[in-house]
Image (cartoon, helix red, strand yellow):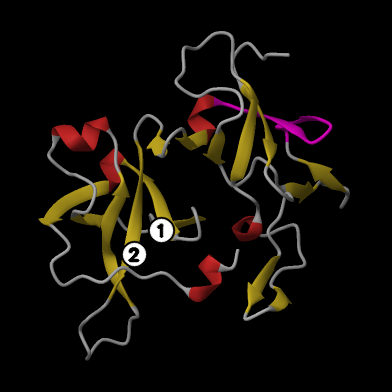
């Protein structure tokens, strides 16, 4: 069973990640289908598209767009699946909706990259995180041509903090053209990873 233009995927675990475990206690953090923040973004590839050549293979883990598994309320107030729902817990995913795949390590797709947030070390600031700054965790070929490599401290555009949890680590997903400046290596920057990311 293959789609011509799209991947067929299934969520790994539930469609939503509504619970976290803190010191052995299970905590419900969401009870609504409306928030995209708690939608599962990790999937398994069931089949690859016939039309495209891809390094992604059947059975690979992938990180996907936050709306693929999401449910909505339609105009009549009825809860419905996303337009990507196929059948029996299977979903379609366009190649542009797959951000990263796992094959002997994580590899980004196309222009996508992932950045770790860093702590603000200015004690006079009331912000916990350093604004528009992070450490590149997963790069891509385009960034490498500009000599922007994994581990570099980078500056990025406003409002690009699209949160993903990858292997219990909070990361921001963005594209190459969202990276504006390279500051160098980690130097004195400390990556931030909240405790709730490790319990998801």
Query: Would residue 139 appear left or right of 33 to someone viewing this image?
Result: left
The image's mark for residue 149 is none
Question: Residue at left 46%, top 12%?
Answer: 53
Question: Residue at left 27%, top 40%?
Answer: 177
The image's mark for residue 161 is 1
Query: Would residue 107 appear left or right of 180 to someone viewing this image?
Result: right
Q: Nearer the viewer, residue 102 or 2?
A: 102
Label 2: few (<14), some (14–19) or many (≥20) C-alpha neighbours in 10 Å: many
Question: Residue at left 64%, top 59%?
Answer: 38
Question: Residue at left 54%, top 37%?
Answer: 62
Label 1: few (<14), some (14–19) or many (≥20) C-alpha neighbours in 10 Å: some
Query: What are the residue bounds of the magenta stretch?
Result: 83-94
Q: Nearer the viewer, residue 34 or 65?
A: 65
Q: Is residue 55 magenta?
A: no
Residue 168 placement (x, y as % from top left): 50, 60
Task: Tell us which disc is closer to us: 1 or 2.
Answer: 2
Quadrant of the snapshot with the C terminus: bottom right
In terms of secondary structure, where does tag 1 sit?
Answer: loop
List the residue tagged with mark 2.
117
């Amino acid at each position: 069973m293959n789609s011509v233009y799209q991947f067929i995927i299934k969520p790994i675990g539930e469609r939503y990640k509504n619970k976290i475990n803190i010191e052995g206690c299970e905590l419900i953090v969401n009870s609504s289908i409306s928030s995209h923040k708690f939608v599962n973004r990790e999937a398994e590839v069931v089949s690859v598209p016939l039309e495209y050549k891809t390094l992604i293979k059947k059975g690979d883990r992938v990180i996907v767009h936050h709306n693929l598994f999401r449910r909505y309320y339609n105009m009549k107030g009825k809860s419905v699946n996303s337009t990507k729902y196929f059948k029996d817990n299977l979903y379609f995913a366009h190649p542009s909706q797959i951000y990263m795949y796992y094959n002997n390590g994580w590899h980004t797709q196309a222009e996508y990259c992932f950045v770790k947030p860093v702590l603000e070390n200015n004690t006079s600031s009331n912000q916990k995180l350093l604004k528009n700054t992070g450490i590149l965790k997963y790069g891509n070929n385009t960034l490498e041509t500009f000599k922007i490599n994994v581990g570099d401290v980078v500056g990025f555009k406003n409002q690009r903090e699209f949160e993903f949890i990858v292997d219990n680590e909070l990361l921001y997903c963005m594209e190459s053209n969202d990276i504006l400046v390279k500051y160098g290596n980690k130097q004195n920057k400390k990556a931030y990873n909240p405790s709730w990311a490790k319990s998801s």
